[in-house]
Amino acid sequence: MKRIILLLLIIPLLFGCSAKKNKPEDPYRIAVITMMQGGEFWGALKNGARSARSATGAVLEFFAPVNESDYEGQITMVEKAIDQDFDAIILSPSHFTRLEDSVARARGKGIKVVLADTGLKNQAADFSITADYQAIGKAMAERAFSHFSADQPIKALVLGSMPNSTSMTQIVESLVQAFNARDNARIVSATYSFTDESIARDITRNAFKSDPDINLVFALEEYTAHGVANALADHAPICFIAFGTTQYEIQLLEEGVIDALVVVNSFNMGYRSVLAAVDLLNGTKPAKKLVDFALVTKETMFSEEHQRLLFQTFQ
């Protein structure tokens, strides 16, 4: 009887000791799966994750399709991370429903899932880190309205990148709400470029042909902003608010072509996502906090705070 009791006491201890710890000889393996390979936004996020790798000792592997619109490619990468038994997955879902089954399967296998930047509609993750995209949309509208008198008609073109990400949906919804609350202001067209610069350029040119009175453009992604800027090269100056931190956009901001750049601290997002994944694996609850953002203007772009945001890649 004593031997049976002793075994009953030892077995739980053995199982407890078998839990993986983040040790140099056996570190946590974390898959970081972004929407696409290129882009300053995703580059800064990955640099932030790499910085956290140094701080935590976790091993990171990065995956991403070439284009944000390659939903199936991103699903395949999540499934690959599951099959390779990663301890955690950091994911920026390019579609708010198509990734749900894969996330559910990952969590069902005990893999911790942290959503970075974008979320899912009906499937919970273990943790999420994002910016307040509703507030971003509101700030963009308020900045634009400041250029017009109260009785001046405003006709806006809104160009997003992807129609099925939570971040893009929230910005557009917030812009629509702001325009509905203001007299003499309306959104002439709200459409998507699928992160294709040439598509954004053609949409902008066609919009101005259809309605030459458009006097405001919102470009909600960096490649989209490049396409809009190219379309506006031979156009009279208008209010142009863009999203991103590319060298081209920063140049256009300094030249006064872009009125304001929306900059989200994606470096911080990547850094905190890795810390959150490690906390979850260690049984610790990560701290909930929104990622900061700013509307950077020609007047503020050389401030220390905005320089840090504009050049996140070099932090």
Image: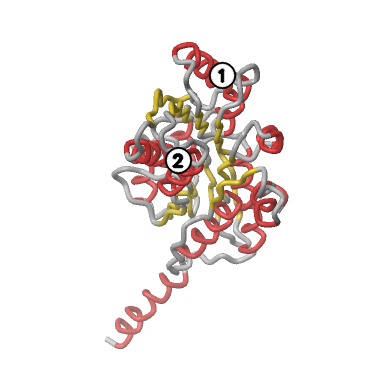
Q: Position of residue 114 (x, y in %)?
A: 45, 52
Tell whether 173 sits left or right of 147. Answer: left
Tell me how far mark 2 sits from mark 1, CA to CA. Answer: 22 Å
Position above or below: 282 against 192: below
Closer to the camera in the image, 292 or 140: 140
- Rendering quarter of residue 155: top left
Residue type, mark 1 in image: Arg
Local crowd size for mark 2, using a 10 Å CA cut-off: few (<14), some (14–19), many (≥20): some
Figure quadrant of the N terminus: bottom left
Q: Residue furthest bottom?
A: 2
The residue type indicated by label 2 comes to: Ala
Q: SS of the residue at dot 1? A: helix
N-term-proximal mark, 2 vs 1: 2
How does the figure colour the protein chain or chains? secondary structure
Which quarter of the rendered picture does the C terminus lie within? bottom right
Numbered label tally:
2
For label 2, the residue is 141
Which residue has dot 1 on it? 201
Please determine whether, in this image, residue 227 is positioned above or below residue 118.
Answer: above
Corner quadrant of residue 280: bottom left
